[in-house]
Image: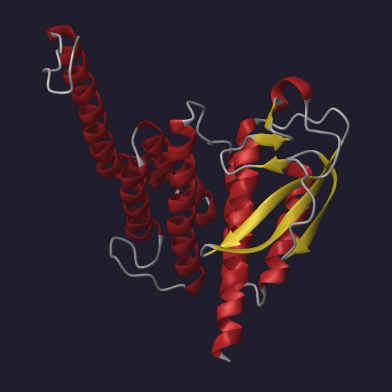
C-alpha cells in the first residue's frame, strides 16, 4: 500500500517526453517572435514595387494577412509584435514623406491606426483559432469587413451606428434571414453563438457543420470593457451552415460594436 509520503516515480520516458514537449513549444514561440520581427518587413519589401499603383488600403490589408500568419504559428505576443511592426513599416515605406517615421496625410494616419488595431484584433482571433486547432482567418473578404467596421468605430458619432452596421454585416456573413439588436435584455434561453464560434442549444453543443444553424433565433451577446450592452438576435435561413471562420468573424464584429457602445457611453458621461 502506498502512502502520501511515498516518492512519485517519474519514468525516464515520461520525463523525456515532457522535456521534448517544452522544448518544442519554446522553439515554436521563439520562431514566432523572430517571424514577427522579420515577416512584416519582408512583406513590405515585396509590396514596395507596387507602391505607385496600389492604394494604401490594399497594402494595409495585405500586411494584416502577414500578422495573421505570424499569430497562427505563434501566440498573442507574436501577433501583437507583428501588428506593431506592420504599422511601423507601413508608415516608413508607404506614407509621405517616404523612409521616415512621419505621416503627413490625415488619411494615411487613419489607415495606419486602423492597420494596427485590425492587426491586433485579428491576431487575437488567429491565436484563439490556433488553440481550437482550426484554420486562421486569412480570407480577404473577412478581413475587409473587420477593417471596415474598425474604421466606422473610429469615425462614427454614436455606438448605435456601429451596431446597425454590424447587424447588416451579420446577415450576409452568416447567411441569415434577418438580424436585430436588443439592448440590455436577456430574456429566455435561445441558442447562443459563443466567443469560440460554437453554438450552444439546450444543454449541449449544436453541430453547425452537420445540421446547419438551429431554426430559431440565435443570440450573439455584445460586451464593451467587460460590461454587457445587449445582444444581436440572428434569424437563420433554412439550411444555413456558416463556416467556423465566418462565426469567429461575427463574434469579432460584435466585440467591435460593444467597444463602440462603451466609447459612446464614456463620451456621454464626460459631457
> Depth check: 158 or 57 in front?
158
Identify the image quadrant of the N terminus.
top left
Residue 3 appears left or right of 265: left
**Viewer-proximal residue, 131 or 154?**
131
Give the side of residue 34 with respect to residue 218, left or right.
Answer: left
Q: State the image quarter where residue 148 is shown.
A: bottom right
Left or right of residue 244: residue 49: left
Do we see residue 184 in this rendering?
Answer: yes
**Number of numbered callouts drawn:** 0
In the image, what residue occupies the spot 78% across and 32% down? 213
Measured from the top left, where is residue 177 in percent x and y?
88, 43
- Which image quadrant is residue 204 in? top right
Q: Identify the image quadrant of the C terminus.
A: bottom right
Query: Residue 139, relative to residue 116: is it above or below?
Result: above
The residue lying at 48 percent from left, 74 percent from top is 106
- Which residue is pictured at 47% across the width and 38% down the height? 128
Residue furthest out toward the bottom: 271
Colour pattern: secondary structure
Q: Is residue 115 left or right of residue 185?
A: left
Q: Residue 18, image x and y in percent?
A: 21, 19
The x and y percentages for residue 54 are 52, 50
State the image coordinates of residue 139 (x, y, percent, origin top left): 58, 36
- Is 240 placed above or below 187 here? above
Q: Quadrant of residue 22?
A: top left
Amino acid at each position: 500500500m502506498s502512502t502520501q509520503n511515498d516518492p512519485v516515480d517519474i519514468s525516464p520516458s515520461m520525463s523525456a517526453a515532457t522535456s521534448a514537449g517544452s522544448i518544442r513549444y519554446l522553439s515554436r514561440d521563439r520562431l514566432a517572435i523572430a517571424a514577427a520581427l522579420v515577416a512584416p518587413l519582408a512583406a513590405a519589401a515585396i509590396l514596395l514595387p507596387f507602391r505607385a499603383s496600389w492604394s494604401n488600403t490594399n497594402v494595409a490589408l495585405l500586411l494584416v494577412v502577414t500578422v495573421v500568419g505570424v499569430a497562427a504559428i505563434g501566440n498573442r505576443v507574436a501577433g501583437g509584435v507583428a501588428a506593431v511592426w506592420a504599422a511601423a513599416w507601413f508608415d516608413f515605406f508607404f506614407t509621405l514623406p517616404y523612409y521616415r517615421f512621419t505621416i503627413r496625410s490625415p488619411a494615411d494616419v487613419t489607415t495606419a491606426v486602423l492597420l494596427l488595431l485590425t492587426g491586433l484584433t485579428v491576431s487575437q482571433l488567429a491565436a484563439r483559432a490556433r488553440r481550437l486547432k482550426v484554420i486562421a482567418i486569412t480570407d480577404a473578404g473577412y478581413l475587409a469587413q473587420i477593417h471596415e467596421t474598425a474604421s466606422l468605430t473610429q469615425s462614427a458619432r454614436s455606438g448605435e451606428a456601429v451596431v446597425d452596421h454590424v447587424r447588416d454585416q451579420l446577415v450576409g456573413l452568416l447567411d441569415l434571414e434577418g438580424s436585430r439588436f436588443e439592448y440590455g435584455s436577456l430574456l429566455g434561453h435561445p441558442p447562443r453563438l459563443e466567443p469560440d464560434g460554437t453554438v450552444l442549444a439546450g444543454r449541449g453543443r449544436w453541430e453547425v457543420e452537420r445540421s446547419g444553424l438551429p431554426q430559431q433565433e440565435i443570440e450573439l451577446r455584445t460586451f464593451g470593457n467587460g460590461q454587457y450592452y445587449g445582444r444581436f438576435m440572428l434569424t437563420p435561413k433554412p439550411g444555413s451552415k456558416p463556416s467556423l471562420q465566418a462565426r469567429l468573424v461575427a463574434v469579432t464584429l460584435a466585440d467591435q460594436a460593444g467597444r463602440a457602445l462603451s466609447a459612446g457611453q464614456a463620451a456621454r458621461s464626460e459631457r
